[in-house]
């Protein structure tokens, strides 16, 4: 496969032939496997470890039109010290114009700054605007760029166009990590999720991310499973490891732990670090902290004792 | 051909639905004479947790409803209960006449509390005289989620602890009487068909000693009514656990007489007072 991968992107027809040559996804099988892995019981000390790991994997996100400098600063403070002796989260994720605020607030803390770019969430603009959007975010100090793919072009079968856009944005990222958002809720089939995952990885993505969080359904377990299979197979084929970030719809500790089980059982524990697996979320963090407190104190926690965000 | 009777499965009442206990457990309920009546669900701490979540979710809507609307709904519960008078009298057992009197007293108790919904603010609130150019108004506000450990009296006692908690806008999680929980579940059927929003009253059946401590310690419960806790040690440990987040605790010194005039103490026990200052002349 390695030899063929070198030139799959040489032409539109070669790329199409490769993507359509990927094995199809058994929808029922994928749903069942994800559901079955979701029934694993993770308790006591294992649960405590899983919660801390999940906290350290969170990309704490605010992507609202109403975001202010103050809100971003408050979120950054929480990202560094979520509460008690809980670990810092992996990154905060904001719109490009707020990157500078986040960078300032997180200086020297080790928490990364991620910025969405490329006309997030729809991606409906010209390549020039997408690239300059990315350039601005990188110039403001973003460590990671979350780009969206052109779902319209992808669904219309213009794979080369999507590929070239990812390559162009990757070039604009420089040393910043590139996460490619597939927006699986709009891709209609699991086969498309697998194709889009491979397309993004071939084009140079460092991470593949399920969703923007603006479209439902977002990060469903079967979709995450398929993407984890894709990164596993991609590393087997090329030796290059790609990260996965489910985002959107992960609100409870139970969901987060199900995701960790999926990672462990699908891609393996090489991916069980914040470097290779992230959880894009906002309200999830409070639930993780509440579960953490429940384990520490033995009493059910209440949201009155955690920050509003 | 003789007909097979369709017997009721007694389940829990959480968030407007009737789920079985997540633990899958049940326990046999017997009459006063020791005859088997039915199996009731034996709720676990996770059912209690789910019930608190449901109660919390229902709180903004219920506390935000107008007092008039809450009164109407309580009155509606009384109407529905009246319609099932015979069924409840049957379930209570004992003498037929005494049982009917109990049911009537329960309906009357509901109507009595229904009337209080839009009057409690006038009685318990105040326009305070202050030394300054301000209106100073105190008004009662519901405390939040109230955990209620119901007394052994399965109908009048139960309604007499639940109605005062919800009429002011609180939502509650009720631990039904352990030896006689069936009336509480049948009452839940009445609540479910009375326009009472799901989650305002949640009913758990099972071991009091298993459920009460979790509710007493729960940080998202704002008050606990220990009226039904007969075991003094359990009540004490619940009080201590409740102190962690400064829950309001109601623990009557002696077992209340449910037939007596209830007074407004049970309503005011689960109220906060909000005081606002408003400048005069603007």
Image (spheres, grey):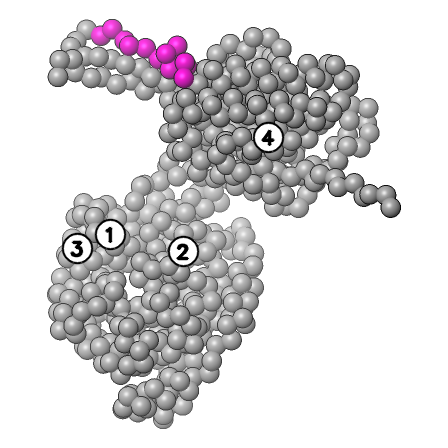
- The first of marks 3 and 1 along the sequence is 1
Q: Which residue is mark 2?
A: A250
The C terminus of chain B lies in quadrant: top left
How far from the left and from the top, in percent, is residue A92? 26, 56
- Secondary structure of the residue carrying tag 1 is loop
**Tag 2 subunit:** A
Q: Which mark is residue A64?
A: 1
**Dividing the picture into quarters, in which one does residue B18 lie?**
top right
Q: Nearer the viewer, mark 3 or mark 4?
A: 4
Q: Which residue is mark 4?
A: B190
What is the C-alpha distance between the residues marked 1 and 4?
Answer: 43 Å
Which residues, given as a range, are shown in magenta? B118-130
Q: Nearer the viewer, mark 2 or mark 1?
A: 1
How far from the left and from the top, in percent, is residue B81? 61, 24
- Secondary structure of the residue carrying tag 2 is loop
Residue A175 against residue B66 in the figure, above or below: below
- Whether B126 is among the magenta residues is yes
What is the C-alpha distance between the residues marked 3 and 1?
Answer: 11 Å
- The first of marks 2 and 3 along the sequence is 3
Residues under numbered marks 3 and 4 in contact, where contact means CB atoms less than 8 Å apart: no
**Dot 2 crowding, Cα within 10 Å, few <14, some 14–19, many 20+:** many
- Secondary structure of the residue carrying tag 4 is helix
How far from the left and from the top, in percent, is residue B275? 29, 17
- Note whether residue A1 is visible: yes
């Amino acid at each position: 496969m390695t030899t063929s991968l070198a030139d799959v992107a040489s032409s539109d027809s070669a790329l199409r032939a490769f993507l359509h040559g990927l094995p199809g996804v058994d929808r029922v099988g994928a749903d069942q496997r994800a559901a079955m892995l979701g029934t694993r019981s993770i308790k006591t000390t294992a649960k405590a470890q899983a919660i801390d790991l999940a906290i350290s994997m969170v990309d704490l996100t605010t992507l609202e039109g109403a975001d202010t400098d103050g809100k971003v600063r408050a979120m950054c403070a929480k990202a560094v010290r979520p509460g008690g002796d809980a670990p810092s989260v992996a990154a905060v994720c904001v719109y490009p114009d707020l990157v500078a605020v986040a960078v300032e607030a997180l200086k020297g803390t080790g928490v990364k700054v991620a910025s969405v770019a490329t006309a997030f969430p729809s991606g409906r603009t010209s390549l020039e605007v997408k690239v300059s959007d990315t350039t601005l975010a990188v110039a403001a100090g973003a460590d990671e760029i979350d780009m969206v793919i052109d779902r319209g072009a992808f669904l219309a079968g213009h794979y080369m166009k999507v590929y070239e856009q990812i390559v162009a944005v990757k070039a604009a990222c420089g040393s910043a990590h590139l996460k490619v958002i597939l927006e699986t809720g709009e891709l209609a089939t699991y086969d498309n999720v697998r194709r889009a995952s491979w397309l993004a990885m071939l084009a140079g993505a460092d991470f593949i991310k399920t969703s923007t969080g603006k479209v439902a359904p977002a990060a469903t377990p079967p979709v995450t499973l398929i993407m984890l299979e894709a990164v596993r197979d991609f590393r087997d084929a090329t030796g290059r490891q790609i990260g996965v970030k489910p985002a959107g719809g992960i609100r409870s500790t139970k969901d987060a732990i199900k995701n960790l089980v999926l990672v462990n059982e699908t891609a393996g524990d090489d991916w069980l670090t914040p470097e290779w697996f992230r959880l894009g979320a906002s309200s999830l963090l409070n639930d993780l902290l509440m579960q953490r407190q429940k384990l520490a104190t033995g009493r059910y926690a209440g949201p009155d004792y955690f920050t509003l965000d | 051909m003789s007909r097979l009777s369709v017997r009721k499965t007694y389940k829990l009442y959480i968030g407007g639905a009737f789920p079985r206990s997540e633990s899958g457990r049940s326990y046999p309920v017997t009459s006063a004479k020791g005859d088997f009546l039915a199996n009731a669900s034996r709720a676990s701490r996770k059912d209690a947790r789910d019930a608190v979540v449901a109660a919390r979710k229902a709180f903004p809507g219920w506390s935000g409803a107008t007092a008039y609307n809450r009164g109407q709904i309580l009155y509606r519960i009384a109407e529905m209960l009246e319609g099932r008078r015979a069924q409840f009298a049957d379930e209570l057992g004992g003498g037929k006449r005494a049982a009917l009197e109990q049911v009537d007293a329960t309906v009357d108790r509901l109507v009595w509390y229904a009337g209080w919904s839009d009057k409690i603010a006038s009685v318990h609130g105040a326009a305070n005289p202050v030394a300054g150019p301000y209106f100073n108004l105190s008004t009662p506000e519901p405390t939040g989620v109230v955990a209620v450990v119901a007394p052994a009296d399965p109908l009048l006692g139960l309604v007499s602890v639940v109605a005062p908690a919800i009429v002011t806008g609180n939502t509650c999680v009720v631990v039904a009487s352990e030896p006689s929980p069936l009336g509480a579940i049948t009452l839940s059927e009445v609540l479910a068909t009375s326009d009472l929003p799901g989650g305002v009253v949640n009913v758990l059946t099972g071991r009091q000693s298993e459920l009460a401590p979790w509710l007493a310690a729960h940080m998202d419960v704002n008050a606990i009514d220990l009226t039904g806790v007969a075991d003094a040690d359990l009540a004490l440990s619940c009080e201590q656990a409740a102190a962690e987040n400064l829950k309001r605790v109601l623990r009557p010194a002696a077992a209340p007489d449910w037939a007596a005039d209830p007074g407004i103490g049970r309503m005011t026990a689960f109220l906060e007072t909000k005081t606002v200052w408003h400048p005069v002349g603007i």
